[in-house]
Image (cartoon, helix red, strand yellow):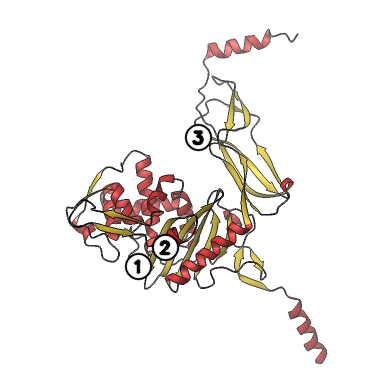
Amino acid sequence: MKKVVLGLLALVLAMPLWSSVTYADHGGPHDAGAEVSSDEAVLAENSKSAILIDADTGTVIFEKKSHEKLPPASITKIMTMLLTMEAIDKGKLKLTDKVTASEYASSMGGSQIFLEPGEQMTVDELLKGVAMASGNDASVALAEKIAGTEKNFVKMMNDRARQLGLKDTHFENCNGLPVENHYSSAHDIAMISRELLKYEGITKYTGSYQDYLRKETEKPFWLVNTNKLVRFYSGADGLKTGYTSEAKFCLAATAKRDGLRLIAVVLGEPNTKTRNSEVSAMFDYAFSQYSVQPIYKTGEVIGKVKIKKGKTSNIELAASKTMSVLIKKGSEPGSITQKLELPDKLVAPVKEGQVIGKLVVYQDGKPITEFELRASTTIEKAGFWTLFKRTTSQLFFVDS
């Protein structure tokens, strides 16, 4: 019996210990979920759920129950701001457009900018009200302007979530006020935040600490950002706070230093002090441990593909934006390699934006990220005469 007990004890001691927090050194979003040993970084201990990513590559640096479905409170408004910025980008909306507040929009409780029924504000002013003051009324006013009704806008929100491949999210309103079947996850919020940050102008709103609405009236309304990190954390310029008694204290934050932009999301924190402290610690960790290494600059040619039967005989593939990877500080310079995966040739026509191939980046032989390579222009199919001349020139060409 003694030998059996000793044998069981030896077996238990030999078993590895794992932390409940997941962490990925260099993997992309799909690497999330791998368990790590307990000597890795422990962050956001008081949150119900958390995630920390590199905004540029989407690399998950740290996560904790990041796919758990939870009430997101006013972090919901990140999707509202995303659809607003997309409408502006598509020309369907202008920052100078006037928006008339409906009776319904003005009836919203909770955080608000106290819109009166029939009051007019510009899209620019309402974005300030959403981003800085977390205005529930401002959110509904924008939703109605874009989609006609909040119900139609919420459908747009859910459609956009599906387009982004988000599986932990379902919206029932545009502002995050408590309602049944309204949920998201730290992971999904980080992905929506990453999409929103593609619009550089958004940080003008989310990164401002104070401003005014109705400034030239008898009732000026002082805006103070509910996200105090934009004032007290170096490099922080967004994104959105949230609180309800059910959701507790939530924050989707972003900060940028030395070319590295981070997104941190925490849900279910016990109070604002802990929430801000734990997000700051997440940022401190990533900025101290990681850096961005550029691979190609915007416009730099990466490769070339032959085009068969096209008006032009080849297409150059250039970086549409700076391509970079997230690496651990102190990594060997030669540890980063890349592989270009392109077809030998394509048959015209080729459409602008068409995915042609990809660039895969490796560290120490392991893939860490990849970039889609798209056609920067349309190449139409060549006519008969063009093809005839091209063929005959090849037939009679003599290499001297």
Rendered-image quadrant of the C terminus? top right
Residue topped by disc 1: 180
> Tag 1 or tag 3, which sits nearer the N-term?
1
Give left or right: position of 25 versus 270: right
> In this rendering, is residue 262 above or below 398?
below
Q: Which of the two marks, 2 or 1, is nearer to us in this view?
A: 2
Which element carries disc 2, helix, strand or loop? loop
> Tag 2 or tag 3, which sits nearer the N-term?
2
* Disc 2 and disc 1 in contact, CB within 8 angstroms: no
Rendered-image quadrant of the N terminus? bottom right
Residue topped by disc 2: 228
Circle 2 packing at 10 Å, graded few (<14), some (14-19), many (20+), is some
- Residue at image position (26%, 43%) is 97
The amino acid beneath tag 2 is Lys
The amino acid beneath tag 3 is Gly
Circle 1 packing at 10 Å, graded few (<14), some (14-19), many (20+), is few
The amino acid beneath tag 1 is Glu
Q: CA distance from mark 3 to mark 1?
A: 40 Å
Q: Which of the two marks, 3 or 1, is nearer to us in this view?
A: 3
Which element carries disc 3, helix, strand or loop? loop
